[in-house]
Amino acid sequence: MNSPTFNAWKLVSLSPLPSWALVFLALGLLLGVALAAWGVRREPSRGRRVLLWALRVGAGVAALFFLLEPGIRHLQVARMKNRVAVLVDRSASMGFPSEPGGPTRAAEVATFLEKASPALAGLQDRFTVEMYGFDPELAPITPASLAKEPPRAGSTDLLAALRAAAGAGQGARKLSGVLLFSDGADNTELKAGVVGRARAALADLGVPVSTFTVGQEALKDLAIEGLKVDDFAFVRNSLTVEAEIHGRGFRGKEIPVVLSQEGKTVASKTVRLETNDDVKPVSFTFTPDQTGRFVYTVTVPTFPDEAVTDNNSRSFTLKVIRDRVRVLLVVGRPSWDERYLRGLLKQDANVDLISFYILRTLSDDPGVVNERELSLIPFPMEEIFDTKLDTFDVVIFQNFGHADPSLSIAEYERNLERYIHNGGAFVMIGGDSVLGEGRATMPTLMEALPVAAAGPANVEPFTARLTPEGLRHPVTAIGSGASSTEAAWGELPPIPGANLTYARPGATVLLEHPHLTANGKNAPLVAVWDYGRGRALVMATDASWYWAFAAHRDGSPNRAYDRFWGNALRWLVRDPDLTTLKVTADPPSVEPGRPVAVVVQARSADYQPAQDAQVRVELFSVATQKPVAVQTGATGPDGVVRLEFAPPDPGPYKLLATAKKGETDLGKGEDAVAVRAVGPELSDASVRPELMEQIAKVTGGKAYKLPQDGLPDMPLLDPPVVEVGRAKDQPLWDRWYYLVALIGLLGAEWFARRRFGYV
Amino acid sequence: MSARRLTRRNLLLGSAALAPLLAGRAHAFGEKNRFIPAVAKHGGRWDSRLSGLRRIAWELQRRTSVEVVPDARPFALSSPDLFEYPFLYFGGDGGFPPLNDAEVANLRRYLTYGGFMLADANDGSDGDGFDASFRREMARVLPQSPLAEVPSGHVVFKSFFLLDAAPGRLLNKPQMMAANLGKRAAVLYTQNDVAGAWSRNESGDYEFDVSPGGEPQRELAVRLGINVCMYALCLDYKDDAVHLQLILNKRR
């Protein structure tokens, strides 16, 4: 009786009564059966009792049948065609050979898929088979394209690919299963294995992932992995670089590991690999002695039969900065000028102050019979002016000039002059013992200073005057702009006295005496210059403390003194923010095949942004000691230009920049950049079958290894069944014999009861 | 507190000792950069130890490399000129009336921006007289920095001489008190009349006897004065690491 269009049926109730009414009536029937049983409980004959119970139960069931009105519903249904996704890893590691001397891993997958094509086609009656490569973005592939196009992706992200495949079916056909082809060398979310969130994410996919691991684990390879180093380090502070040496097939071998800084060996160690697949940590501790950015490289030897040779060295850039500016303050005698400078330097968290004061000279008589009553220590001249001189960033002489043999530094003057010439920073603060006063002339040291003594000091109070150069120089820029700086200096109180000096050729006078002259020019109060690779500053008075203390006499706080000395220290130690040409590699480490970019910020001598400055940057290979490329450009209104070099060969490079505006030289600057030989993808040639097995296990799939003879029987979710057409109900209860049976049962019970004497 | 007798010999010695200092002043470079104690004028007896201050300046010149002007320059506490003299002596014999608001504000600014004050109870009072008045005013000037006892390891006890106590003309309290601003003791206060032990009369004799320790105690008071001046000039220099081991060895 079924219509030919119906292909399924099910039993249903056709009763028009609501469910609650049906439940109520059913309970009434049960009560009737129970009362019948209760009524015959004293019947001595077990047979009669059972007969009466059976007849009542039979009548109850028949009544229930009529209540529920059962029927058959004929249906027209169809089965959905779900998707099966074939995902093939297109990361660069799939380009490694699947076995020594064999085809690449990608080629092996292509061969298998070609071979499995008929079996995959056989799935088409129930599933739509979709084939994607992932890098990790999904892109359609064919076995032919797999064999033709080499894998290139810089990372392997299996989970992202699985998510993308699962997500693609949302709102459309659902996914019944995934066939995942990879070497398992995940270097993103599943790098640590199927644990934690990654495990939950895999389980949430709700689809069995059958994995096909490609590649053998027995490749011979030596790799530098797990390089751990901070982005920056402090000069003269020890630093540790940690790396892991991963060796496969090097059991029992001693491997030398070398850390070098731009071609110069910094440290080396040897590790012994104990097993055929061994990872040995190695750490190098060294102390950088220069500030700046440098390229360091960790290297292990390359063996002829290695699967990958590019992962035998790994470069990184390290920015070496000052931790604190190490200042040596040498004071000729305690004074208020010393007291306020010390107070300032001690409270500056960026300054590590080492100070020596001459508290007593040969002519002083402390009035003690035993030196132990004094807290004085010997003046360690040799230590500070010879042995440890180079450890100081800045040396300050504050009215320090003694002719006594025990305190004279005549023997160390040349050391100090060389210290400045070789990149040190020196400050001479005036007073009655230096700069033409006192008996100690220190001629060799004076060669390195921007001023020379010109006669006796003038002790008349005066207000220091800012020169045009001082108006814009970072040392005297104590305001937020030129006018603010000028106003700030104008507000400072007069100071009592200055040494009479004149500026040497090449010196920059920042502050000067308003009317005291030497050689026909106003006498300098603060002058600076570059001497060799170093810098020197002279403050020709011992009364700058008036700017620190007397400046507060009228009630308003004044930070001019703090700002001046803070600026001076930053300028002296060549704070990068105060250089005229700032060169920054962007970024400092470049992945293989990426361009090298550099940002150059040019400022003019007055430290204003230099617009339209002509910048020239040379990319200089540290390995070959030769320039590789040159880029030029002009700065914008902000004094900044960004230049880019075509991707160079891997290795360490220097970016050497010069700039000019018209005929004016804006100085030079440099930075370092490391172009990596291999990215994270190629640094490890290993295959991770255990990861592939875990993925299959967590998702309910199965794990296989290539090669396989054909497509195995994988778990796939059955496509769901849905009604797609009409339904027709056919009643079952409206037959005459069901009514006869009910009446017969009720009549038989009535007859039996009457017969047995219950009615 | 009997004054010593003036003798011709003492007068000649005193004059001879001051001669080099006066000669030095004539050629000084920036005299104001030298050590010159300022003296606080207040409503009580503030000027009874001026000779003592001149004397300690002289001792500082004689015993150390510090260049001084052996003078004591009085200033009203409201005077802006105080800001050219970072060392201020605040002494008194007996109580004194409250400072006015301008004096309190100026003194607070003076101490806050780097000035140093040595306070000295010339009357050796404790709970009355100068002591009561000074504590009352300090509570107004630096309410956030109450006076606290100076620990024996403080740098003032090793800034030039190695000392264990803080005696003056008297020895009422073996230690001084300090009002600290940050790590710096902006005020040191002694109740032992330390300037009384330094004071000499015009003929060069010490003005007051020192008790209970006599002349050795006077020498210690002079050394304390020099240490206080050195602390004002050098701050915590002797707490630098390079000094610690040597000073520790000397103290053993």
Image (cartoon, helix red, strand yellow):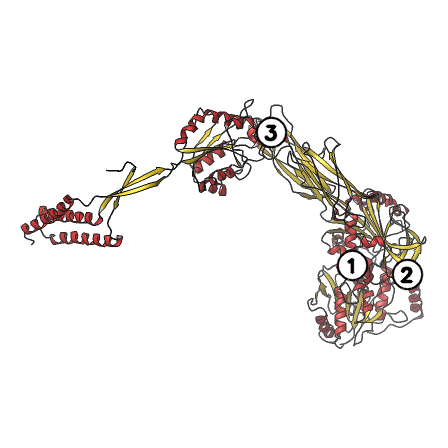
- The amino acid sitting under disc 2 is Val
Q: Which residue does the image show at 75% across and 44% down from the upper left?
A: A635
- The amino acid sitting under disc 3 is Leu
Taking the image as shown, residue A385 lies to the left or right of residue A729, namely right
> In the rendered image, which residue does mark 3 sit on?
A222
Q: CA distance from mark 3 to mark 2?
A: 75 Å
Residue at mark 1: chain: A
Q: Identify the element where label 1 is drawn.
A: helix
Q: CA distance from mark 2 to mark 1?
A: 29 Å
Mark 3: few/some/many CA within 10 Å (<14, 14-19, 20+): many
Residue at mark 2: chain: A
First in sequence, mark 3 or 2: give its number: 3
> Picture coordinates of residue B190 (x, y %)?
75, 68
Taking the image as shown, residue A449 lies to the left or right of residue A713, namely right
Residue at mark 3: chain: A
Q: Identify the element where label 3 is drawn.
A: strand
- The amino acid sitting under disc 1 is Ser
> In the rendered image, which residue does mark 1 sit on?
A484
Question: Observer-nearest residue: A667 or A377?
Answer: A667
First in sequence, mark 2 or 1: give its number: 2
Q: Are marks 3 and 2 on the same chain?
A: yes
Instruction: Judge whether A535 appears above or below A225 on screen.
Output: below
**Residue A50 seen in render:** no
Determine whether label 2 and label 1 are within 8 Å by CB: no
Q: CA distance from mark 1 to mark 3?
A: 62 Å
Q: Quadrant of the N terminus of chain A?
A: top left
Mark 2: few/some/many CA within 10 Å (<14, 14-19, 20+): some
Q: Quadrant of the C terminus of chain A?
A: bottom left
**Residue A395 seen in render:** yes
> Picture coordinates of residue B104 (x, y %)?
75, 71
Residue A459 numbered mark, or none? 2
Q: Identify the element where label 2 is drawn.
A: strand
